[in-house]
Image (spheres, rainbow, N blue to C red):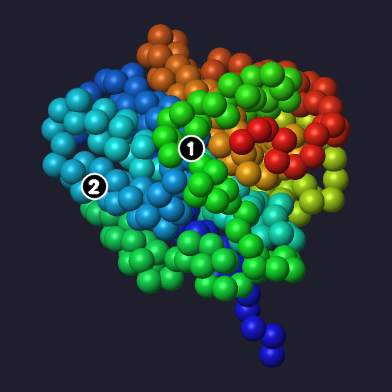
Amino acid sequence: MKKLHYSWVILCLIFFSIIVAGIIRSSAGVFVIPFENDFDWNRSTITFAFGLSLLMYGLLGPFMGALVQIIGLKKMILLSMGTLMTGLFFSLFMTETWHLVLLWGILIGGGSSLFLTVLSPIIANRWFVKRRGLAVGVLTASTATGQLLLLPVVAYIVEKSNWRISLSLILMLSILTIILITFFMKESPKSIGISPYGGATVHSTELENNQIDRNPFRLAISVLFDAFSYKEFWLLAGSFFVCGLSTSGLIGTHFVSYCIGFGFAAVTAASMLSFMGIFDLVGTTLSGWLSDRFDNRWLLFWYYTLRGISLVFLPIALFEGSFTLLIIFAIFYGLDWIATVPPTINIARNVFGLEKSVIIYGWIFAAHQIGAAVAAFGGGVIFERYYSYTSAFVGAGILCLFASLCVIVIRKKHGKTENTIAK
Protein backbone atom coordinates (compact mmCIF):
# COMPACT_ATOMS: atom_id res chain seq x y z
CA MET A 1 0.00 0.00 0.00
CA LYS A 2 1.37 3.40 -1.01
CA LYS A 3 2.26 5.62 1.94
CA LEU A 4 0.25 8.81 2.29
CA HIS A 5 2.38 11.82 1.44
CA TYR A 6 2.71 14.14 4.47
CA SER A 7 1.60 17.09 2.32
CA TRP A 8 -1.95 15.74 2.56
CA VAL A 9 -1.67 15.52 6.35
CA ILE A 10 -0.64 19.18 6.40
CA LEU A 11 -3.53 20.01 4.06
CA CYS A 12 -6.03 18.37 6.45
CA LEU A 13 -4.48 20.09 9.48
CA ILE A 14 -4.58 23.53 7.90
CA PHE A 15 -8.08 22.80 6.56
CA PHE A 16 -9.28 22.33 10.15
CA SER A 17 -7.36 25.41 11.37
CA ILE A 18 -8.97 27.63 8.74
CA ILE A 19 -12.39 26.16 9.59
CA VAL A 20 -11.95 27.34 13.18
CA ALA A 21 -10.64 30.78 12.21
CA GLY A 22 -13.44 31.09 9.65
CA ILE A 23 -16.22 30.29 12.11
CA ILE A 24 -14.77 32.79 14.59
CA ARG A 25 -14.91 35.48 11.92
CA SER A 26 -18.22 34.52 10.33
CA SER A 27 -20.02 34.20 13.69
CA ALA A 28 -20.04 38.01 13.82
CA GLY A 29 -23.21 38.07 11.70
CA VAL A 30 -25.05 35.92 14.27
CA PHE A 31 -23.99 38.16 17.18
CA VAL A 32 -25.19 41.50 15.73
CA ILE A 33 -28.73 41.35 17.15
CA PRO A 34 -27.78 39.65 20.48
CA PHE A 35 -25.20 42.35 21.14
CA GLU A 36 -27.76 44.97 20.16
CA ASN A 37 -30.33 43.56 22.61
CA ASP A 38 -27.98 42.61 25.45
CA PHE A 39 -25.91 45.80 25.62
CA ASP A 40 -28.31 48.31 24.03
CA TRP A 41 -25.65 49.18 21.44
CA ASN A 42 -26.78 50.60 18.09
CA ARG A 43 -26.23 48.53 14.98
CA SER A 44 -23.83 50.92 13.25
CA THR A 45 -21.50 50.75 16.29
CA ILE A 46 -21.54 46.96 16.28
CA THR A 47 -20.99 46.70 12.54
CA PHE A 48 -18.17 49.26 12.80
CA ALA A 49 -16.28 46.83 15.07
CA PHE A 50 -16.98 43.91 12.74
CA GLY A 51 -16.05 46.03 9.73
CA LEU A 52 -12.78 47.00 11.43
CA SER A 53 -12.11 43.30 11.98
CA LEU A 54 -12.53 42.64 8.25
CA LEU A 55 -10.26 45.56 7.44
CA MET A 56 -7.60 44.51 9.96
CA TYR A 57 -7.24 40.95 8.78
CA GLY A 58 -7.08 42.10 5.19
CA LEU A 59 -4.49 44.83 5.69
CA LEU A 60 -2.28 42.60 7.84
CA GLY A 61 -2.22 39.80 5.25
CA PRO A 62 0.91 40.85 3.34
CA PHE A 63 2.79 41.46 6.59
CA MET A 64 1.77 37.99 7.77
CA GLY A 65 3.25 36.60 4.55
CA ALA A 66 6.48 38.46 5.24
CA LEU A 67 6.57 37.36 8.90
CA VAL A 68 6.17 33.71 7.91
CA GLN A 69 9.34 33.99 5.82
CA ILE A 70 11.18 35.60 8.74
CA ILE A 71 10.08 33.80 11.93
CA GLY A 72 8.59 30.59 10.53
CA LEU A 73 5.22 29.16 9.57
CA LYS A 74 4.44 27.06 12.65
CA LYS A 75 5.24 29.89 15.08
CA MET A 76 3.01 32.28 13.13
CA ILE A 77 0.10 29.83 13.11
CA LEU A 78 0.37 29.31 16.89
CA LEU A 79 0.68 33.05 17.53
CA SER A 80 -2.34 33.84 15.35
CA MET A 81 -4.57 31.17 16.88
CA GLY A 82 -3.45 32.26 20.35
CA THR A 83 -4.52 35.81 19.52
CA LEU A 84 -7.95 34.56 18.41
CA MET A 85 -8.28 32.54 21.61
CA THR A 86 -7.44 35.62 23.70
CA GLY A 87 -10.01 37.75 21.87
CA LEU A 88 -12.73 35.14 22.36
CA PHE A 89 -11.95 34.64 26.05
CA PHE A 90 -12.12 38.32 26.98
CA SER A 91 -15.26 38.79 24.84
CA LEU A 92 -17.09 36.79 27.49
CA PHE A 93 -16.51 39.68 29.93
CA MET A 94 -16.91 42.77 27.71
CA THR A 95 -19.35 45.50 28.77
CA GLU A 96 -18.39 48.61 26.76
CA THR A 97 -18.33 49.40 23.05
CA TRP A 98 -14.58 50.02 23.16
CA HIS A 99 -14.18 46.46 24.43
CA LEU A 100 -16.00 45.25 21.30
CA VAL A 101 -13.79 47.36 19.04
CA LEU A 102 -10.60 46.19 20.75
CA LEU A 103 -11.49 42.51 20.98
CA TRP A 104 -13.36 41.95 17.70
CA GLY A 105 -11.98 44.79 15.62
CA ILE A 106 -8.30 44.45 16.61
CA LEU A 107 -7.54 41.08 18.23
CA ILE A 108 -9.91 38.82 16.32
CA GLY A 109 -9.34 40.79 13.13
CA GLY A 110 -5.56 40.52 13.49
CA GLY A 111 -5.60 36.91 14.69
CA SER A 112 -7.65 35.68 11.74
CA SER A 113 -5.45 37.46 9.20
CA LEU A 114 -2.94 34.67 8.54
CA PHE A 115 -5.60 31.95 8.26
CA LEU A 116 -8.00 33.83 6.01
CA THR A 117 -5.54 35.59 3.69
CA VAL A 118 -2.14 34.14 2.80
CA LEU A 119 -2.03 30.75 4.54
CA SER A 120 -3.69 28.88 1.65
CA PRO A 121 -1.15 29.97 -1.02
CA ILE A 122 1.73 29.50 1.45
CA ILE A 123 0.75 25.87 2.05
CA ALA A 124 0.09 25.25 -1.65
CA ASN A 125 3.42 26.79 -2.72
CA ARG A 126 5.47 25.12 0.00
CA TRP A 127 3.95 21.61 0.14
CA PHE A 128 2.70 21.04 -3.43
CA VAL A 129 4.16 21.13 -6.92
CA LYS A 130 1.35 19.19 -8.55
CA ARG A 131 -2.26 19.96 -7.57
CA ARG A 132 -1.49 23.48 -6.32
CA GLY A 133 -4.76 24.86 -7.64
CA LEU A 134 -6.70 22.02 -6.04
CA ALA A 135 -4.89 22.57 -2.72
CA VAL A 136 -5.78 26.27 -2.76
CA GLY A 137 -9.38 25.44 -3.65
CA VAL A 138 -9.73 22.96 -0.78
CA LEU A 139 -8.17 25.31 1.78
CA THR A 140 -10.19 28.29 0.58
CA ALA A 141 -13.38 26.23 0.78
CA SER A 142 -12.64 25.42 4.42
CA THR A 143 -13.86 28.88 5.49
CA ALA A 144 -17.29 27.91 4.17
CA THR A 145 -17.08 24.49 5.80
CA GLY A 146 -16.88 26.22 9.18
CA GLN A 147 -20.20 27.87 8.43
CA LEU A 148 -21.61 24.59 7.16
CA LEU A 149 -20.76 22.71 10.36
CA LEU A 150 -21.06 25.26 13.12
CA LEU A 151 -22.94 28.45 12.23
CA PRO A 152 -26.41 26.91 12.68
CA VAL A 153 -25.23 25.47 16.02
CA VAL A 154 -23.99 28.90 17.10
CA ALA A 155 -27.28 30.51 16.03
CA TYR A 156 -29.34 27.81 17.77
CA ILE A 157 -27.48 28.21 21.06
CA VAL A 158 -27.82 32.00 20.85
CA GLU A 159 -31.58 31.69 20.24
CA LYS A 160 -32.25 29.03 22.89
CA SER A 161 -29.75 30.13 25.53
CA ASN A 162 -27.29 33.03 25.17
CA TRP A 163 -24.40 34.20 23.06
CA ARG A 164 -21.75 33.56 25.75
CA ILE A 165 -22.33 29.80 25.64
CA SER A 166 -21.97 29.72 21.85
CA LEU A 167 -18.82 31.82 22.13
CA SER A 168 -17.41 29.34 24.66
CA LEU A 169 -17.95 26.50 22.17
CA ILE A 170 -15.86 28.33 19.58
CA LEU A 171 -13.22 29.08 22.22
CA MET A 172 -12.81 25.36 22.94
CA LEU A 173 -12.27 24.69 19.24
CA SER A 174 -9.48 27.27 19.15
CA ILE A 175 -7.77 25.51 22.07
CA LEU A 176 -8.05 22.15 20.26
CA THR A 177 -6.50 23.71 17.16
CA ILE A 178 -3.48 24.95 19.11
CA ILE A 179 -2.92 21.42 20.47
CA LEU A 180 -3.10 19.85 16.97
CA ILE A 181 -0.77 22.43 15.44
CA THR A 182 1.74 21.98 18.27
CA PHE A 183 2.05 18.23 17.73
CA PHE A 184 1.53 17.70 13.99
CA MET A 185 2.48 20.86 12.07
CA LYS A 186 5.82 20.79 10.23
CA GLU A 187 7.67 23.83 8.92
CA SER A 188 8.25 22.54 5.36
CA PRO A 189 8.86 19.32 3.38
CA LYS A 190 12.59 20.02 3.65
CA SER A 191 12.39 20.02 7.46
CA ILE A 192 11.31 16.35 7.48
CA GLY A 193 13.48 15.28 4.55
CA ILE A 194 10.85 14.84 1.84
CA SER A 195 10.00 16.60 -1.42
CA PRO A 196 6.78 18.56 -1.92
CA TYR A 197 3.92 16.57 -3.40
CA GLY A 198 4.69 16.07 -7.09
CA GLY A 199 8.25 17.39 -6.70
CA ALA A 200 11.28 15.36 -7.75
CA THR A 201 13.77 16.59 -5.14
CA VAL A 202 13.91 17.79 -1.55
CA HIS A 203 14.00 21.58 -1.70
CA SER A 204 12.54 24.67 -0.16
CA THR A 205 10.23 26.96 -2.08
CA GLU A 206 11.00 29.78 0.33
CA LEU A 207 13.80 32.27 0.12
CA GLU A 208 16.91 31.30 2.07
CA ASN A 209 17.45 33.24 5.28
CA ASN A 210 20.33 35.28 3.88
CA GLN A 211 18.11 36.47 1.01
CA ILE A 212 15.28 37.73 3.22
CA ASP A 213 14.87 41.32 4.32
CA ARG A 214 14.54 40.77 8.08
CA ASN A 215 12.19 43.75 8.44
CA PRO A 216 8.68 42.44 7.59
CA PHE A 217 7.27 45.93 7.11
CA ARG A 218 9.99 46.90 4.64
CA LEU A 219 9.74 43.58 2.81
CA ALA A 220 5.96 43.81 2.38
CA ILE A 221 6.07 47.48 1.32
CA SER A 222 8.90 46.96 -1.18
CA VAL A 223 6.98 44.14 -2.87
CA LEU A 224 3.89 46.37 -3.00
CA PHE A 225 5.77 49.20 -4.70
CA ASP A 226 7.18 46.75 -7.25
CA ALA A 227 3.64 45.58 -7.99
CA PHE A 228 2.35 49.10 -8.63
CA SER A 229 3.84 49.07 -12.15
CA TYR A 230 1.76 46.03 -13.15
CA LYS A 231 -1.68 46.61 -14.64
CA GLU A 232 -2.62 43.10 -13.54
CA PHE A 233 -2.13 44.06 -9.89
CA TRP A 234 -4.63 46.91 -10.11
CA LEU A 235 -7.20 44.83 -11.99
CA LEU A 236 -6.93 41.95 -9.55
CA ALA A 237 -7.01 44.26 -6.52
CA GLY A 238 -10.00 46.19 -7.89
CA SER A 239 -12.00 43.06 -8.66
CA PHE A 240 -11.12 41.61 -5.25
CA PHE A 241 -12.38 44.82 -3.60
CA VAL A 242 -15.76 44.02 -5.11
CA CYS A 243 -15.37 40.36 -4.13
CA GLY A 244 -14.93 41.28 -0.45
CA LEU A 245 -17.72 43.84 -0.57
CA SER A 246 -20.17 41.29 -2.00
CA THR A 247 -19.24 38.33 0.25
CA SER A 248 -17.91 38.56 3.81
CA GLY A 249 -18.72 42.26 4.14
CA LEU A 250 -22.33 42.12 2.95
CA ILE A 251 -23.56 38.52 3.08
CA GLY A 252 -21.36 37.50 6.01
CA THR A 253 -22.37 40.46 8.18
CA HIS A 254 -25.90 41.40 7.08
CA PHE A 255 -27.56 38.39 5.46
CA VAL A 256 -28.99 36.99 8.72
CA SER A 257 -30.35 40.39 9.78
CA TYR A 258 -31.76 41.00 6.26
CA CYS A 259 -33.67 37.71 6.38
CA ILE A 260 -34.94 38.36 9.92
CA GLY A 261 -36.39 41.66 8.67
CA PHE A 262 -38.63 39.70 6.29
CA GLY A 263 -39.89 37.34 8.98
CA PHE A 264 -37.43 34.48 8.67
CA ALA A 265 -36.12 33.02 11.94
CA ALA A 266 -32.46 33.55 12.86
CA VAL A 267 -31.79 29.80 12.78
CA THR A 268 -33.38 29.57 9.33
CA ALA A 269 -31.23 32.42 8.03
CA ALA A 270 -28.08 30.94 9.55
CA SER A 271 -29.02 27.57 8.04
CA MET A 272 -29.18 29.27 4.64
CA LEU A 273 -25.61 30.44 5.19
CA SER A 274 -24.69 26.87 6.02
CA PHE A 275 -26.51 25.67 2.91
CA MET A 276 -24.40 28.13 0.94
CA GLY A 277 -21.39 26.61 2.68
CA ILE A 278 -22.21 23.18 1.26
CA PHE A 279 -22.22 24.51 -2.28
CA ASP A 280 -19.27 26.78 -1.68
CA LEU A 281 -17.24 23.78 -0.53
CA VAL A 282 -18.11 22.10 -3.84
CA GLY A 283 -17.77 25.24 -5.96
CA THR A 284 -14.45 26.45 -4.55
CA THR A 285 -12.85 23.01 -4.63
CA LEU A 286 -14.04 22.61 -8.22
CA SER A 287 -12.72 26.09 -8.98
CA GLY A 288 -9.28 25.02 -7.78
CA TRP A 289 -9.43 21.99 -10.07
CA LEU A 290 -10.60 24.15 -12.99
CA SER A 291 -7.92 26.77 -12.37
CA ASP A 292 -5.24 24.14 -13.08
CA ARG A 293 -6.82 23.45 -16.47
CA PHE A 294 -8.60 26.49 -17.94
CA ASP A 295 -8.07 30.20 -18.59
CA ASN A 296 -8.34 31.81 -15.15
CA ARG A 297 -9.55 35.13 -16.59
CA TRP A 298 -12.69 33.54 -18.02
CA LEU A 299 -13.31 31.65 -14.80
CA LEU A 300 -13.28 34.95 -12.91
CA PHE A 301 -15.51 36.60 -15.53
CA TRP A 302 -18.23 34.01 -15.06
CA TYR A 303 -17.87 33.89 -11.28
CA TYR A 304 -18.42 37.63 -10.90
CA THR A 305 -21.23 37.69 -13.46
CA LEU A 306 -23.19 34.90 -11.78
CA ARG A 307 -22.62 36.41 -8.34
CA GLY A 308 -23.94 39.76 -9.52
CA ILE A 309 -27.09 38.17 -10.91
CA SER A 310 -27.70 36.21 -7.70
CA LEU A 311 -27.37 39.33 -5.50
CA VAL A 312 -29.92 41.21 -7.58
CA PHE A 313 -32.19 38.16 -7.30
CA LEU A 314 -32.01 37.95 -3.47
CA PRO A 315 -34.35 40.91 -2.68
CA ILE A 316 -36.94 39.38 -5.03
CA ALA A 317 -36.79 36.11 -3.09
CA LEU A 318 -37.19 37.91 0.25
CA PHE A 319 -40.01 40.22 -0.91
CA GLU A 320 -41.88 37.15 -2.13
CA GLY A 321 -41.28 35.52 1.25
CA SER A 322 -40.46 32.34 -0.63
CA PHE A 323 -38.33 29.74 1.12
CA THR A 324 -37.90 27.96 -2.23
CA LEU A 325 -36.51 31.07 -3.93
CA LEU A 326 -34.18 31.62 -0.96
CA ILE A 327 -32.84 28.09 -1.40
CA ILE A 328 -32.27 28.76 -5.12
CA PHE A 329 -30.30 31.89 -4.20
CA ALA A 330 -28.27 29.96 -1.62
CA ILE A 331 -27.32 27.33 -4.22
CA PHE A 332 -26.17 29.75 -6.93
CA TYR A 333 -24.51 32.19 -4.57
CA GLY A 334 -22.90 29.39 -2.57
CA LEU A 335 -21.28 27.82 -5.63
CA ASP A 336 -19.65 31.17 -6.33
CA TRP A 337 -18.96 32.56 -2.84
CA ILE A 338 -15.16 32.32 -2.77
CA ALA A 339 -14.59 30.44 -6.01
CA THR A 340 -12.73 33.57 -7.16
CA VAL A 341 -9.75 32.83 -4.90
CA PRO A 342 -7.96 29.95 -6.75
CA PRO A 343 -7.88 31.68 -10.17
CA THR A 344 -6.87 34.99 -8.57
CA ILE A 345 -3.96 33.29 -6.78
CA ASN A 346 -2.97 31.48 -9.99
CA ILE A 347 -2.88 34.71 -11.99
CA ALA A 348 -0.83 36.41 -9.24
CA ARG A 349 1.61 33.48 -9.19
CA ASN A 350 2.00 33.52 -12.98
CA VAL A 351 2.58 37.28 -13.09
CA PHE A 352 4.73 37.82 -10.01
CA GLY A 353 6.44 34.47 -9.48
CA LEU A 354 6.30 31.80 -6.80
CA GLU A 355 8.44 33.49 -4.13
CA LYS A 356 6.74 36.88 -4.09
CA SER A 357 3.21 35.87 -5.06
CA VAL A 358 2.18 35.21 -1.44
CA ILE A 359 2.94 38.78 -0.37
CA ILE A 360 1.40 40.14 -3.58
CA TYR A 361 -1.74 38.11 -2.94
CA GLY A 362 -1.73 39.48 0.61
CA TRP A 363 -1.98 43.00 -0.82
CA ILE A 364 -4.66 41.94 -3.30
CA PHE A 365 -6.57 40.42 -0.41
CA ALA A 366 -6.15 43.66 1.53
CA ALA A 367 -8.23 45.30 -1.20
CA HIS A 368 -10.76 42.47 -0.70
CA GLN A 369 -11.05 43.33 2.98
CA ILE A 370 -11.29 47.07 2.39
CA GLY A 371 -14.31 46.23 0.27
CA ALA A 372 -15.61 43.94 3.01
CA ALA A 373 -15.20 46.65 5.65
CA VAL A 374 -17.00 49.18 3.45
CA ALA A 375 -19.95 46.79 3.06
CA ALA A 376 -20.02 45.73 6.73
CA PHE A 377 -20.13 49.31 8.01
CA GLY A 378 -21.97 50.78 5.03
CA GLY A 379 -24.70 48.14 5.21
CA GLY A 380 -25.39 49.11 8.81
CA VAL A 381 -25.52 52.80 7.90
CA ILE A 382 -27.87 52.14 4.95
CA PHE A 383 -30.17 50.08 7.19
CA GLU A 384 -30.34 52.79 9.86
CA ARG A 385 -31.19 55.41 7.23
CA TYR A 386 -33.65 53.48 5.05
CA TYR A 387 -34.66 50.60 7.38
CA SER A 388 -33.81 48.24 4.53
CA TYR A 389 -30.76 46.48 3.09
CA THR A 390 -32.19 46.17 -0.42
CA SER A 391 -30.23 49.00 -2.06
CA ALA A 392 -26.99 47.64 -0.56
CA PHE A 393 -27.52 44.16 -2.06
CA VAL A 394 -28.62 45.40 -5.47
CA GLY A 395 -25.70 47.85 -5.60
CA ALA A 396 -23.28 45.03 -4.76
CA GLY A 397 -24.72 42.95 -7.59
CA ILE A 398 -24.13 45.76 -10.09
CA LEU A 399 -20.53 46.15 -8.90
CA CYS A 400 -19.96 42.41 -9.45
CA LEU A 401 -21.00 42.79 -13.08
CA PHE A 402 -18.48 45.63 -13.41
CA ALA A 403 -15.75 43.46 -11.83
CA SER A 404 -16.38 40.75 -14.43
CA LEU A 405 -15.38 43.25 -17.13
CA CYS A 406 -12.21 44.20 -15.25
CA VAL A 407 -10.82 40.67 -15.00
CA ILE A 408 -11.40 39.75 -18.63
CA VAL A 409 -8.98 42.47 -19.86
CA ILE A 410 -6.07 40.98 -17.91
CA ARG A 411 -3.43 39.73 -20.33
CA LYS A 412 -3.50 35.95 -20.72
CA LYS A 413 0.25 35.55 -20.31
CA HIS A 414 2.93 37.79 -18.86
CA GLY A 415 6.26 38.12 -20.54
CA LYS A 416 8.32 37.34 -17.45
CA THR A 417 8.91 33.99 -15.89
CA GLU A 418 8.40 32.75 -12.38
CA ASN A 419 10.15 34.75 -9.67
CA THR A 420 9.83 37.93 -11.74
CA ILE A 421 10.07 40.64 -9.10
CA ALA A 422 13.61 41.28 -8.07
CA LYS A 423 14.68 40.13 -4.70
Residue that extends furthest to the bottom in the rendered view of this protein? 1
Occupied quadrant, residue 195: bottom right
Count neighbours of disc 2 (C-alpha within 10 A) and say few if under 14, some if 14 to 19, many if 20 or more. Answer: some
The alpha-carbon separation of the residues under discs 1 and 2 comes to 30 Å
Of residue 422 and residue 266, the one placed in the foreground of this image is 422
Q: Position of residue 354 (x, y in %)?
A: 67, 45
- Pick whichever of labels 1 and 2 is earlier in the sequence: 2
Rendered location of residue 87, percent (x, y):
25, 43
Q: Is residue 352 left or right of residue 268?
A: right
Q: In the rendering, which numbered label is found on residue 378?
A: none
Instruction: Say above or below: 139 vs 408.
Output: below
Whether label 1 touches label 2, CB < 8 Å: no
**Secondary element type, mark 1:** loop
Q: In the image, what residue occupies the spot 40% across and 14% down?
A: 381
Identify the image quadrant of the C terminus: top right
| Residue pointed to by mark 2 | 86
Nearer the observer, disc 1 or disc 2? Answer: 1
In this view of the protein, can residue 94 be seen by the observer? yes
In-image side of 253 versus 105 (left or right):
right
Residue bearing the label numbered 1 = 213
- Residue displayed at 74% across by 61% down: 130
